[in-house]
Amino acid sequence: MSQIIDQGELQTRAASVEFKSVTKRYGTDVTAVDDVSLKVKAGELVTLLGPSGCGKTTTLRMIAGLEMASSGHILIGGSDVTRLPATDRDVSMVFQSYALFPHMTVLENVCYGLRASGKSKKQSIERAEHGLDLVGLAGYGSRLPSELSGGQQQRVAVARALVLEPQVLLFDEPLSNLDAKLRRQVREDIRDIQQRLSLTVVYVTHDQEEALAVSDRIIVMKNAMIAQVGSPRELYEQPASEFVADFIGEANILDAEIIAVHDGVATVQVGDIALSLDARGLGTGTAKLAVRPNRILMQPIEAGSANALTGRVEKATYVGNRIEYMVSTATGSIFCTSEETDRQINEGAEVAVRFDSVGPVILPHA
C-alpha cells in the first residue's frame, strides 16, 4: 500500500517494489539477472550492491521499465507492471551522468518533465521551485548547470525526479562523478531527503562505504544472483559467505578448526589462538574465519604472546587517520589497522597478533 505524505505542493506516494523469480537474459548465452526475488518496503531505502557485471544495474533498469524481464513478475505498489513501458510505471530515475540539459536554466531543467506530462507553465514553475527548495537550491533557478558544482548538479537531478511525485525513486551510481568530500555530503543530502519525505528508494552502487552509510537494507549481488540481504550492520558483522565478508568492507579470511560446539557456541582454533564464537549452525571440523582489520590487536613481541599469533611486520603504511599493517604469520598474511598513528611499529618488527573478542565470525560453508 502506498503512503501519501503532503509536503506542501509535493506529495510523495511511496510504494513497495517486489520481484518474483525475475530473470533477464540477453540472447541464449548471457543471463544478467538469474531468478531474483526481493521486496522493498514502501518508504525504505534499499541498495543494490556488488561488483561490475553482477546484475545490479540491470535489476534497477527492470524496475524502471528500461529493460523488460525475460521471465518472472515485477510489482510496484502491489500492481503487476512486468509488461508496462517505462512511461506507465510512475517511477523516476536519477542517472550517474545527471543528464541535465546544458542550454536550459536549473528551473527549466526541473520543469521539463512536468511540462512534458501536461502541467501548465504556472503549475510547473511553482512545483519546480518547491522541489529546488527541498534539495537546498532555492534561488538557483536562473543559473545554468555549468555554473553549479557537481554536488549541486546532482541535487538538481534529484529535484527534477522528485517533482514528478514518483512512487519509487531510483538512483544509478549517483555519486561516482564526485570527489570524496562531495560524495560524503551528497549521500547525506540524499538520505536526508529520503527520510524526510518517506520516499521508496532503490539505489545502485559498487561502493561499500556508500551503501553502508545510506541504506536501510542492502542487497548484495554476485554473478546475477542475490548473495545476501540484510541491514548494514548485519552484513558487516554477520556475513553469510566469504564473498560478502570480503566485499562488505575488508576482511581477513583465515583457515580455522572448530574443536567443539556446545549450546551453539563453538570453540575455534586459529594457529595458537583459541576463540569462543557463535557456531552459526556448524559442527566440528575445518572452517573459515572472517576477521576485520580493525578488530585485530598487534603488539611488540616483548609484550607477551599468550593466545596470539606471532608474526613479522612486512609493511606499514601511514594513511592519515590510521596506519595499515601487513603482517606475515604461520597462518598466512594478516591485514590490520591501528589508529595509534603516533606509535608506528616499524617494518621487520616481531609482533604478537590477537583478535578482539567481538568481531571475528565463523563463515557458513558455501
Image (cartoon, helix red, strand yellow):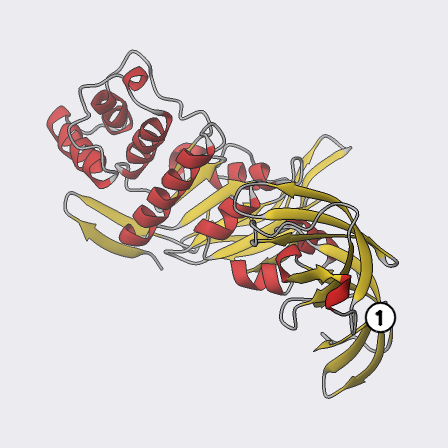
Quarter of the image with the N terminus in it: bottom left
Helix, strand or loop under label 1: loop
Between 284 and 201, which is closer to the camera in this rendering?
284
Give x and y (percent) for residue 202.
46, 46
Q: Residue furthest bottom?
A: 263
Q: Residue furthest front?
A: 302
- In the depicted structure, whether residue 150 falls above or below residue 260: above
- In the depicted structure, whether residue 120 falls above or below residue 77: above
Task: Determine the image quadrant of residue 319.
Answer: top right
Question: Is residue 32 toward the left or the right of residue 16 in the image?
Answer: right
Between 316 and 242, which is closer to the camera in this rendering?
316
Count of marks overlaid on the render: 1
Q: Residue furthest top?
A: 103
Task: Determine the image quadrant of residue 361.
Answer: bottom right
Quarter of the image with the C terminus in it: bottom right
- In the depicted structure, whether residue 339 falls above or below residue 170: below
Residue flagged by tag 1: what amino acid is it? Asp
Residue under pointer 1: 272
Between 126 and 26, which is closer to the camera in this rendering?
126
Give x and y (percent) for residue 235.
59, 59
Give x and y (percent) for residue 102.
33, 14
* Residue at left offset 69%, top offset 54%: 251
Q: Can see residue 90?
A: no
Q: How many neighbours does mark 1 have within 10 angstroms: few (below 14), some (14-19), or many (20 or more)? A: some
* Residue at left offset 79%, top offset 74%: 306
Question: Is residue 197 toward the left or the right of residue 27 in the image?
Answer: left
